[in-house]
Amino acid sequence: MMGQFWYQSLGRMRLFLWLALVVPMVGIVDVAGGISVAQAQGVVNDIRVTGNRRVEPETVRSYLQFSVGDAYDEGAVDRSLRALFATGLFSDVQIYPEGGGVVIVALVENPIISQVVFEGNSEVENDALVSEVRSKPRSIYTRARVQSDVQRILDVYRRQGLFAANVQPQVIELDQNRVNLV
């Protein structure tokens, strides 16, 4: 009985020593790591927008959740990425720090729809399809919108009792970041 008590006490003592010595060291490492990351990223001195063709740099900056003079903050960068993607103007957005307090906002703009054409629709009038789809000439092309339009077209066919309809969208890439939808 006495041996079991001594063994349990020794186990508790080891746990206490481990917690007393190791846990504070982990905290020091985390604090030191946080300080070095903050020092490396520092204050935002300049914001450079790259990859934009149609969208003005100031328009892009208006969606950013940080500005020149702010401390670099990953949370603000994440919120900025979400805000820029939510515009639907961009297919890719990257925000990253560069040396000297410069933050790069690298963009890939979604193309502009030049033309929307319907082919093979002998049972439904073009006007019915045009009024149903959201993709229009001179609007921004997104895959999500085209997928939504495919579903809308299928719904039009189903309302007319045509359940075997098949819709295959085609995207024809043109110059100057434009596309035709067929």
Image (cartoon, rainbow, N blue to C red):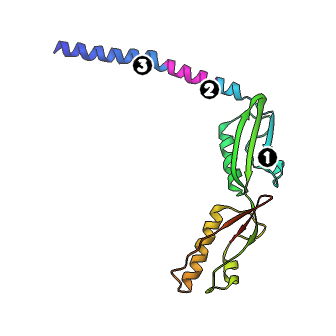
Compared to 97, does 177 lie above or below?
Answer: below
Label 1 and label 3: CA atoms lie apart by: 47 Å
**Residue in view at x 77 percent, y 58 percent:** 177
Identify which amino acid the numbered label 3 is placed on. Leu
| Residue 171 placement, left or right of 160 | right
Instruction: Identify the element where label 2 is drawn.
Output: helix
Instruction: Identify the element where label 1 is drawn.
Output: helix
Residue 166 point in image, percent of width and height:
55, 76
Q: Residues within 10 Å of mark 2 (few under 14, many from 20)?
A: few
The picture quadrant where one finds residue 29 is top right
The magenta stretch is 24-35
The picture quadrant where one finds residue 19 is top left
Q: Nearer the viewer, residue 51 or 95?
A: 51
Which quadrant: the C terminus? bottom right
Compared to 7, does 53 lie above or below?
Answer: below
| Residue 95 placement, left or right of 123 | right
Residue 57 point in image, percent of width and height:
82, 48
Q: Which residue is mark 3?
A: 19
Label 2 and label 3: CA atoms lie apart by: 22 Å
Please, what is the dominant secondary structure of the magenta stretch?
helix
Residue 161 point in image, percent of width and height:
53, 86
Residue 128 point in image, percent of width and height:
67, 83
In this rendering, the label closer to the viewer, 1 or 3: 1
| Residue found at the very far left of the displayed protein | 1
Which label's residue is closer to the chain start, 1 or 3? Answer: 3
Compared to 158, does 182 lie above or below?
Answer: above
Identify which amino acid the numbered label 2 is placed on. Gly
Which quadrant: the N terminus? top left
**Residue in view at x 75 percent, y 49 percent:** 63
Q: Which mark is residue 61?
A: 1
| Residue 60 placement, left or right of 163 | right
Compared to 63, does 157 lie above or below?
Answer: below
